[in-house]
Image (cartoon, helix red, strand yellow):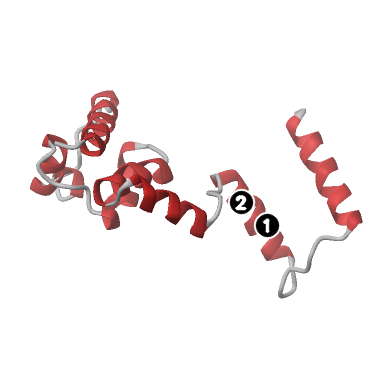
Amino acid sequence: MTNSTLNLVAFLKGRMAEMSVPAPAGSFLASPLFYMVLRGDAKLPLDRVEEVASAIGVDGGQLFRLAARQFYDEDAIRLFERMLGTPMTKEEQQWLHEIRSAADGPVAEPSSTARRLLRALVKSHASD
């Protein structure tokens, strides 16, 4: 078993031990493939990461990075991160969604007034 698989298995087992409710019948967490993942006999399919993260209450991005390391080496992971940009937190995504929904089309570069207003909003929000 590789280090990346050991890290993923330890993470999943730790979170599963914290859960007080068993996996619902019919869910991926109750499937034979997921039990193979927990034993380290199979890789967590990347298309199942979001479902697993949601079911066990962990950050999907963190679980995806752990799962991706089963398939790709560190150089490839760094390349993906560089090419895909800085990951956004859920809160940052909410801000971006609000900005896009408030815009009447393409979002223009922020003016100096918009930058000052945003900084004032963020600073006042942080002090709450």
Viewer-proximal residue among 122 and 83: 83
The residue under the point 31% across, 37% down is 56
Q: Quadrant of the C terminus?
A: top right
Q: Return the x and y of residue 92 as percentages of the image width and height.
A: 62, 47
User: Where is mark 2, residue-wise?
Assistant: 94
Residue that sits furthest to the bottom in the current view: 105
Q: Is residue 54 visible?
A: no
| Rendered image quadrant of residue 109 | bottom right
Q: Is residue 59 visible?
A: yes
The residue under the point 56% across, 50% down is 86
Q: Return the x and y of residue 8 as percentages of the image width and height.
A: 26, 36
User: Where is mark 1, residue-wise?
Assistant: 98
**For the residue labelled by badge 2, is the local secondary structure a helix, a strand or a loop?**
helix
Q: Amino acid at mark 2?
A: Gln
| Rendered image quadrant of residue 21 | top left
Q: Return the x and y of residue 115 as percentages of the image width and height.
A: 84, 52
Locate residue 18 relative to residue 97 in the image: left or right. left
| Rendered image quadrant of residue 7 | top left
Viewer-proximal residue among 24 and 89: 89
Q: Return the x and y of residue 117 as percentages of the image width and height.
A: 86, 49
Q: Amino acid at mark 1?
A: Glu
Q: Is residue 111 above or below residue 124?
A: below
Q: Do residues under tags 2 and 1 come within 8 Å of each other at their CB atoms?
A: yes
Locate residue 61 relative to residue 94 in the image: left or right. left
Q: Is residue 45 above or below residue 18?
A: below
Q: Quadrant of the N terminus?
A: top left
